[in-house]
Amino acid sequence: MDAIEQVADLLRGASFPVCLTGAGISTASGIPDFRSPDTGLWTKVDPMKAASIDAFLDDPVEFWSFYRHRLGALDTAQPNPAHYALARMEKADYLKALITQNIDRLHKRAGSSAIAEVHGSIDSAVCLTCGRQYPHARMAEALVDPNGLPRCDCGRILKPGVIFFGEALPEEQYALSVSWAQRADLMLVAGSSLAVWPVAGLPDITLRTGGKLVILTASETPYDERAAVVDPRPLEEILPHLADMLQA
C-alpha cells in the first residue's frame, strides 16, 4: 500500500486528526525554509542577528533593513496546492485543527479556519513601549519608502507580530495547540523538521496520549522512528493527492 493510501486510511479512522505545519509547506510558494542546505534562510543569515528579540532591541533600524525584504517576500507569496489541500480536508471534516509554525498567513488565505499560529503572524505589528497594536497595513505602508520605518503614534519603531528567538510563545495560541495535541488521535506533521521547541514537543504529547503520528517532511526528524508513516515527497504533490483520495 502506498504511503499516502496509509495516511488516508488513518485519517478515515481518526476522530480528532490534527495537522502541524512548518516552513516546508510554503517553499512551493517561493518562501525559503530555514534549514535546508544551500537554500535555507539560516544557512545565509545568523538567526541571532536577524530574528532575535535582542537584535531588534539593540538596533531596530538595522533589524528592519533585513526584515523589509523578508516581509516583502511574504506579502507577495500565494498559497500553493498543499495549503489548499489542507483547507479542503478541514472542510470535509478530515482535519479538525491546524497548528502552524509559519507566520505567512497562507493557511488562512487558502481557507483553513481552525488555526493556532504558535509563532505569531505578519498580520499585525506591536509597539514594545506602549503596547499598542496595529494592522499589517501599518508596516506595509511605511515600507513602501525604501528608507521608511513602521512607527507607533508614540514615535517608537514597531515590531512585527511574530515571535523572535528569545521571546515566549503567545500564551493563548500555544495553550490551544497543546490542547489539540492532547485530543489528537492522529497528528500529521507537514513540512516541519521539529527542531524548534516547545512546538517540537507537540507530537510527543499526541504519542503519549495514545495517538498516532504521520511525518510528511523532506528532512529527517527526531520522531521518524516513532511515526506510523514517513513520506518525504513534496507536499504540493502528495497533499492534493491525499485530499482527492479522501473525497473520492
Image: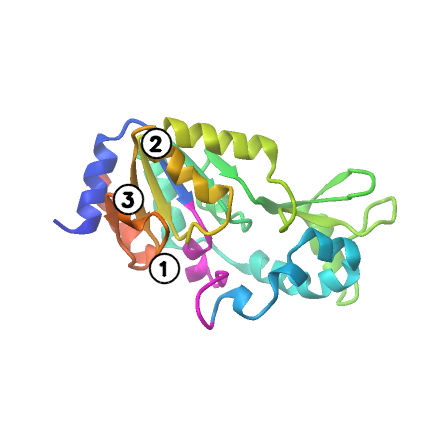
Query: Measured along the vertical axis of the image, is residue 78 above or below residue 93?
Result: below
Which residue position holds label 3? 226
- Please rate how many residues cluster around mark 3, counting C-alpha atoms within 10 Å: few if below 14, some from 14 to 19, many from 20: some
Which residue position holds label 1? 219
Q: Is residue 115 magenta?
A: no
Of labels 2 and 3, earlier in sequence is 2
Amino acid type for the residue under numbered disc 2: Arg
- Please rate how many residues cluster around mark 2, counting C-alpha atoms within 10 Å: few if below 14, some from 14 to 19, many from 20: few
Q: Are marks 2 and 3 in contact (CB under 8 Å)?
A: no
Asked whether 134 or 199 is in front, the reply is 199
Q: Is residue 56 visible?
A: yes
Q: Report the span colored magenta.
A: 21-38
* Magenta stretch prevailing secondary structure: loop
On the rendered structure, is 221 left or right of 70? Answer: left
Query: Measured along the vertical axis of the image, is residue 213 above or below residue 27?
Result: above
Q: Position of residue 189 (x, y in %)?
A: 36, 46
Amino acid type for the residue under numbered disc 3: Arg
Q: Is residue 22 magenta?
A: yes
Disc 3 and disc 1: Cα gap in Å?
A: 15 Å
Asked whether 166 or 79 is in front, the reply is 166
